[in-house]
């Protein structure tokens, strides 16, 4: 009965196009809520009973009935997706309020319809095992998210970004399709469930590499990341939050689903994952530091955190190669927990950034400043989420990164030369990523929220409505719960690991739950001490008159905002170190010799991704230059046009004759 309701809701989603504009939000929220309740019930049942839940469709697709199969891995991702989509819908009510008057009925209908189908396609992708059915919902996920990205498609840059996103999603789709066709040719079945048979009889690395390419584009691993820093800033903020928090995690799900069946080539697979993940983590955070667009900065941090998740996965696979249970359980446990953690603090960060954008009309950090005085609740949500993403206690990001660190450090006590070298490389990489993340968010929060305003805005800046603050409050509650009570969450992700074939036969380290319990207690004590000091400060200041005045600077008062650090100046020292990795451009026109009365000058810097420039921009520009040459075939002669298909048929005949095709 529940699967029938699930399908009926999807069929009824077209009603969004028929209801009046004022009911569109509530109608789509109703449909989404039903999908959340049904799929969450399946997920909770899978965790509670330990059984695999299955639901068969009432119609056939590709000569078979699709079946939802919910194991603990699927259930874990379903719950994460549902929570993020729910907070996104709550946030969308306030964020879309200005658009309800500006946008047409059809544009809003398409937006809400796409939100419903994006949510449904994500949860279906985690529950379907048959190859063709999986690819169908994978394509629906790409199309629905494309329509959401181009919500402001009247802007050419947004439309161009959406098309770029769609093209890259189809490259990933093609790779996954090829991988399933290879499996079908070898086993007769295109399905995730056929992977154990294929991996048992064939080299595991090459098929995993194809799957990794397809799913890695969705996840945003470097160098497959170029869509991500463009699409996130272009999309509406609630869509950016969903994309960063869970859409890219569906790519991680795909990689993990394939890994559940891998049976050999562990060294090669671990090296592949670790190298790409370390590069993604380091390059992601470095590129984030030099961004002035707040949403683009957060987008690059998504790449960084995907790198951390990948490092955890790579550590687990490396543990299988070295026959080390600590590496396996702590690496995979840390990766899975970081999937949850990143979905929380990254969506909260995007919600805060969207609130700032709506209040000020700009995402440019260089034009902000002093926001904490006007929007204290938004600033506090951003600050807590920033501390969490930096992996600092007592927040959840610290817990998942601690698990990966702990596994690698335990491995060092009895590791050989190669194992020690890999472990030290992982530790150094994680430490650099964490340190640079702190550097970046110190800049982002300090420049955007502290100090005084750098610009004058057309309307007074004020706090956003409750619907835009509530999601952040709910998320912070979960962030703190994980930070204070991490052991149950580790036990949850630890139970998922039994579904990975390479984990079978290994005993989980018992000391970890006790260690995490102690860490949770210390975090709670630390938080209570901080709260106590703040309360004491508040009580003391009630009896003291507090004076406010201009900022003091070495005996002088600061003249204006120009004496504050800018985003560019804050990161200038790092720029000199990473110059070979990033292309920096200056937008500045100097003074002319005869310019007696100079015009107002502006100075801006831009940090470009060299990987994107070399792998995407230059090849595309070359292709654009070559396209006019194809016009030579358009001779205008009917004889030539009749000749072309004849040449084509002759070529096909020759290729068939010689057995090439």
Image (cartoon, grey):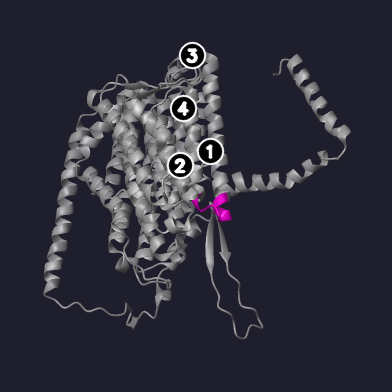
Mark in front: 1 vs 2: 2
Residue 153 shown left or right of residue 71 in the figure: right
Of label 3 and label 1, which has the lower sequence position? 1
Does the magenta run of residues contain 572? no
Residue 169: assigned label: 1
- Packing grade of label 4 (10 A; few <14, some 14-19, many >=20) is many
Of label 1 and label 2, which has the lower sequence position? 2
Observer-nearest of 152 and 441? 152
**Residue 270 x %, y %:** 43, 30
Mark in front: 1 vs 4: 4
Asked if marks 2 and 4 touch (Cβ < 8 Å), the reply is no
**Residue 268 x %, y %:** 47, 27
Asked which secondary structure carries label 2, the reply is helix
Residue marked by disc 4: 134
Mark-to-mark CA distance, 3 and 1 = 30 Å
Query: Range of the magenta residues?
Result: 151-159
**Residue 39 x %, y %:** 32, 31
Residue marked by disc 3: 201
Residue 619, picture quadrant: top right
Of label 1 and label 4, which has the lower sequence position? 4
Mark-to-mark CA distance, 2 and 4 = 18 Å
Mark in front: 3 vs 2: 2
Observer-nearest of 149 and 177? 149
Residue marked by disc 2: 114
Asked which secondary structure carries label 1, the reply is helix
Asked which secondary structure carries label 3, the reply is helix
Residue drawn where x is 73% and y is 47% of the image: 625
Magenta region's main secondary structure?
Answer: helix
**Residue 227 x %, y %:** 52, 45
Residue 189: assigned label: none
Mark-to-mark CA distance, 1 and 2 = 16 Å
């Amino acid at each position: 009965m529940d699967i029938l309701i699930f399908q009926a809701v999807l069929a009824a989603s077209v009603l969004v196009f028929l209801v009046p504009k004022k009911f569109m939000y509530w109608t789509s929220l109703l449909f989404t809520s039903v999908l959340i309740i049904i799929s969450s019930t399946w997920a909770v049942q899978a965790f509670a009973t330990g059984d695999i839940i299955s639901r068969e469709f009432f119609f056939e697709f590709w000569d078979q009935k699709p079946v939802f199969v919910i194991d603990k891995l699927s259930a874990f991702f379903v719950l994460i997706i549902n929570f993020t989509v729910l907070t996104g819908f709550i946030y969308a009510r306030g964020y879309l309020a200005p658009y309800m008057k500006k946008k047409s009925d059809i544009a809003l209908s398409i937006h809400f319809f796409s939100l419903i189908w994006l949510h449904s396609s994500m949860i279906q992708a985690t529950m379907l095992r048959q190859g063709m059915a999986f690819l169908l919902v994978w394509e629906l996920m790409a199309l629905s998210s494309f329509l959401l990205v181009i919500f402001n498609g009247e802007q050419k840059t947004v439309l161009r970004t959406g098309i770029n996103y769609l093209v890259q999603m189809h490259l990933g789709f093609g790779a996954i399709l090829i991988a399933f066709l290879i499996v079908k040719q070898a086993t007769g079945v295109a399905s995730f469930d056929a992977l154990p048979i294929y991996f048992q009889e064939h080299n595991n690395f090459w098929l995993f590499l194809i799957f990794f390419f397809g799913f890695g584009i969705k996840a945003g691993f470097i160098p497959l990341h170029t869509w991500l820093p463009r699409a996130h800033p272009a999309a509406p903020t609630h869509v950016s939050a969903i994309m960063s928090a869970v859409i890219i995690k569906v790519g991680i799900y795909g990689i993990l689903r394939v890994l559940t069946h891998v049976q050999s080539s562990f060294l090669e697979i671990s090296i592949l994952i670790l190298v790409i993940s370390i590069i993604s983590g380091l390059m992601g955070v470095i590129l984030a530091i030099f961004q002035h667009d707040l949403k683009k900065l957060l987008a690059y941090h998504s790449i960084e955190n995907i790198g951390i998740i990948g490092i955890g996965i790579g550590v687990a696979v490396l543990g299988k190669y070295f026959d080390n249970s600590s590496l396996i359980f702590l690496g995979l446990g840390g990766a899975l927990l970081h999937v949850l953690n990143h979905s929380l603090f990254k969506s909260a960060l995007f919600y805060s950034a969207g609130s700032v954008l709506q209040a000020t009309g700009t995402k440019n950090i260089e034009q902000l400043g002093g926001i904490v005085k006007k929007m204290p609740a938004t600033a506090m949500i951003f600050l807590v989420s920033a501390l969490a993403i930096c992996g600092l206690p007592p927040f959840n990001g610290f817990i998942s990164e601690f698990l990966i660190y702990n596994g690698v450090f335990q491995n060092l006590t009895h590791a050989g030369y190669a194992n020690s070298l890999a472990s030290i490389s992982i530790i150094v990489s994680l430490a650099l990523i964490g340190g640079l993340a702190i550097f970046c968010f110190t800049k982002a929060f300090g420049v955007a929220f502290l100090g005084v305003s750098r610009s004058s805005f057309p309307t007074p800046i004020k706090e956003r409505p409750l619907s835009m603050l509530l999601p952040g409050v709910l998320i912070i509650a979960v962030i703190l719960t994980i930070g204070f009570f991490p052991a149950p969450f580790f036990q949850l992700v630890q139970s998922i690991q039994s579904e990975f074939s390479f984990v079978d036969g290994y005993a989980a380290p018992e000391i970890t739950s006790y260690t995490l319990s102690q860490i949770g207690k210390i975090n709670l004590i630390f938080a209570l001490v901080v709260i106590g000091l703040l309360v004491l400060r508040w009580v003391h200041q009630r009896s003291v008159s507090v004076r406010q005045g201009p900022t003091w600077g070495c005996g002088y008062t600061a003249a204006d905002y120009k004496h504050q650090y800018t985003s560019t100046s804050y990161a200038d020292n790092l720029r000199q170190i990473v110059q070979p990795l990033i292309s920096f451009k200056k937008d500045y026109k100097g003074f002319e010799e005869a310019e007696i009365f100079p015009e107002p000058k502006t100075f801006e810097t831009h940090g470009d991704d060299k990987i994107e420039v070399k792998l995407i921009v230059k090849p595309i520009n070359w292709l654009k230059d070559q396209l006019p040459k194809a016009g030579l075939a358009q001779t205008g002669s009917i004889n030539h046009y009749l000749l072309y298909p004849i040449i084509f048929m002759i070529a096909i005949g020759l290729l068939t004759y010689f057995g090439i095709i």
